[in-house]
Image (spheres, rainbow, N blue to C red):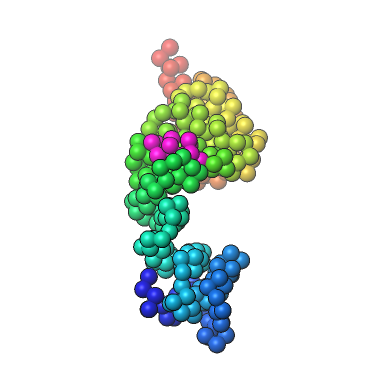
Amino acid sequence: MNTTHKTWNIRWQVTMSLVAGFVLVASPMQSRAEHPVDVQRLTADGDYFKALSVYELLPDRQLDRDTYVSAAKSAWALGLTKQANKLFDTVLRGTTISTDERARITLSRAAIEYQEERYQEAALFAEKAASYLPEKSPLRGRALLLAGQSLIKLSAYSTAEEKLARALGDAASSDRPEVAFSLGTVQVKLGKFSDAERSFKAIPTDHPRAPLAVKALATISMQSEQRDRARFWIEKGRGNYPEAFLDSWADYGLTRVALDSGDLAQARDVVDKAAKRYPPSDGWLILMQAALEQAEWNKAGEGYKQ
C-alpha cells in the first residue's frame, strides 16, 4: 500500500460497509493515536473500525510491520478485502520478516482469495505459503488444506487429493477432521470409495462435519450396493444427528435400499410415511415415488409374462 495516499479512503469504505450509514465517522480531533500499538490492541479486542481509524491517523514514519498486519486483519474482519490485501502485500514486500511470518501472511492472502471465490488465486497463494515451510508443521498442514480445498473447487481432484494427503500428515489434531472430510470428499469424486470411507470414519462423532460424513458414508454404501450398511448409516444419522436428517433425503435412501433388496412392501411403507411429512413438490419425495412406481410396474410386468 502507498502510505502517502492513506487519507479518508479506508474510513469511508468502512463506514459504507456498516449498517445503513448510521455509524458516524470520528474526526481526527476525536481519535488521537498515541502509538502504533493501539492498532494492535484494538484489533485484538475486536474493535476493528476504531483500529482502522487509529491506523489512518498515524504518521507514515510510525508505521511498522505489526501495525500493517493488525490493520489488515481489521480490514479483513470488516469485509474490506481489497484494503486487507494491499496491507498484507505491503508487509510481504518487506525483507525483514521471518519465513514463518511470510508463510502466515501469504496464507491469509490465500484465505481472502478463497473467501472471494477466486479459487485459482487461492490455490496459488496457499501452495506458495506451503513452499516457505520445508519442514513438517501444523501451519504447512493448513496451507496444504486450503490448497486442496481450492483445487476441489476447480475440479482438479487428483492434485487436490495429493495436497490433502500431505496435509493430513502435517495437520494439528484440531485440523485433522477438516482435512479428513475434504480428503473423503475428493476421493468420492475420484471413485475411490474404500479410501473415502476410511477418511469419513476418521472424523470424530462430535465434530461439526460428522453429520455430513455420515450422509456421505450412507451414499457410498448405496452406490456400492451395500444395502445393510446404507441402512445402518442412515439410521445412525437419524439417531445421532436428527437435525441434520430432517429432510427427505434419508427416506429416499431407505426407499432405494428397500427396492434394491426387492422389498416392495417396505418401500411402500417408507414412501407412504414420507408423503405425509413432506409437500408434493419435495424433490426427494418425487424421486422415491417415481422409483417405487417403476419397481411396481416392473413387478407387474414380470407377473404378466408368467
Q: Is residue 147 above or below residue 79?
A: above
Task: Give the image location of residue 15, x and y in percent.
Answer: 50, 76
Q: Going by the picture, which residue comes out furthest to the top?
A: 306
In this view, the residue in front, 239 or 296, is 239
Task: Give the image location of residue 2, x and y in percent.
Answer: 36, 73
Task: Give the image location of residue 101, x and y in percent.
Answer: 46, 55
In this view, the residue in front, 45 or 9, is 45
Q: Is residue 9 visible?
A: no
Task: Give the image location of residue 216, x and y in percent.
Answer: 50, 35
Q: Quadrant of the N terminus?
A: bottom left
User: Which stretch appears magenta?
Assistant: 161-171
Was residue 259 drawn as part of the magenta stretch in this picture?
A: no
Q: Is residue 125 above or below residue 213?
A: below
Identify the residue at horizontal 53%, vertical 73% (top origin).
36
Q: Is residue 144 above or below residue 226?
A: below
Q: Quadrant of the C terminus?
A: top left
Q: Quadrant of residue 272?
A: top right
Q: Main secondary structure of the magenta part?
A: helix
Was residue 163 drawn as part of the magenta stretch in this picture?
A: yes
In this view, the residue in front, 67 or 181, is 67
Identify the residue at horizontal 50%, vertical 75% (top origin).
55
Q: Is residue 34 visible?
A: yes
